Amino acid sequence: EIVLTQSPGTLSLSPGERATLSCRASQGVTNNYLAWYQQKPGQAPRLLISDASTRTTGIPDRFSGSGSGTDFTLTISRLEPEDFAVYFCQQYGSSPWAFGQGTKVEIK
Amino acid sequence: QVHLVESGGGSVKPGGSLRLSCAASGFTFGDYFMSWVRQAPGKGLEWVSYISYTSTYIDYADSVKGRFSISRDNAKDSLFLQMNSLRAEDTAVYYCARGTVTTAGLFDFWGRGTLVTVSS
C-alpha cells in the first residue's frame, strides 16, 4: 500500500507569489499515475493535474505538475486570489488508491 | 453538463446502517467506473469503494471491507453505498466520484457530498 506524504502542511503566501507543493510516495507510483486536486471550503475536489504533469482542460497554465517515481511537485507560478485552497495529491496506479493529507495554501 | 448528487446521509448510532445514493446526469452513466470517496471532518480524502461499468469488478478499502456494499443501477443512472455496522470513525462527508474513460481511479467529476455522522 502506497502512502503519500505532502509538505508543507500549510503554505502562507501573498497573491502573485510562487507556490511549490510537494508530494512524496512511500514507493514508486506506477506509470507516474499521480493527480493533484484543489478543494475549497464546502466544495468538492476539482481535478487539476493527472499523470503527474497533464493539466485538465480549463485549468489555467499557472498550474503545473512535475516529478516521477516517488517525488512529485505542484507549482502555481503566480498565485491568484482564487487559488487559496487545499491541494491533495493522489496516486491511482495501484490499489488501494490513496490521497495525501493535503497542503493548505493560505493568504499571508 | 455532468452532475452527481448524493443523498441519504444523516445521523446514526454506532452499529446502525445507512444507504447512500448518487444520482448521475449529463453523461452515459453505464460507460464509467464509479467510486465513493470520503472525508472525515477537517481531514484528508479516503477512497472507499469502486464499481465497474456492469458491476463485474468491485473493490473496497480495508477500513470498510465486510461492512459496506457498493452497487449501481445503470437503467436509473444511480450509484449506491449500503453501509452497515457503522462506527464513529465512519463519520465523514461521502462523495460520489466518476472515474475517467481510461482510468478508473482518476476522478474527473465529484458530487457535493452527503454528511454521515455516527454518534451515540
Image (spheres, coloured by chain):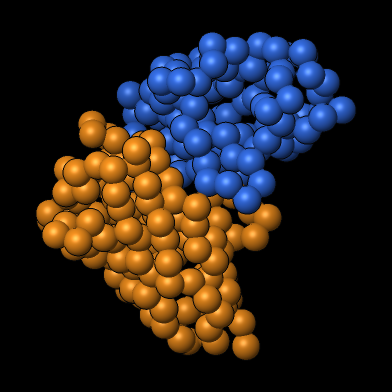
Chain colours: A blue, B orange
Q: Is residue B97 visible?
A: no
Image location (x, y in percent) of residue A78: 70, 12
Between A5 and B7, the one lying in front of the other is B7
The residue shown at (12%, 54%) is: B54
Q: Is residue B18 left or right of residue B114?
A: left
The residue shown at (62%, 17%) is: A75
Image location (x, y in percent) of residue B53: 16, 49
Image location (x, y in percent) of residue A12: 82, 28
Q: How many marks?
A: 0
Quadrant of res B101: top left
The residue shown at (55%, 56%) is: B39
The image quadrant where one finds the C terminus of chain A is top right
Between B88 and A31, the one lying in front of the other is B88
Image location (x, y in percent) of residue B90: 52, 70
Q: Is residue B113 visible?
A: yes
Between A33 and B37, the one lying in front of the other is B37
Residue sitting at the far right: A108
Q: Is residue B14 left or right of residue B63?
A: right
Quadrant of res A2: top left
Determine whether A96 is above or below A85 in the image.
below
Q: Is residue B108 left or right of residue A99?
A: left
The residue shown at (59%, 60%) is: B40
Determine whether A99 is above or below B71 in the image.
above
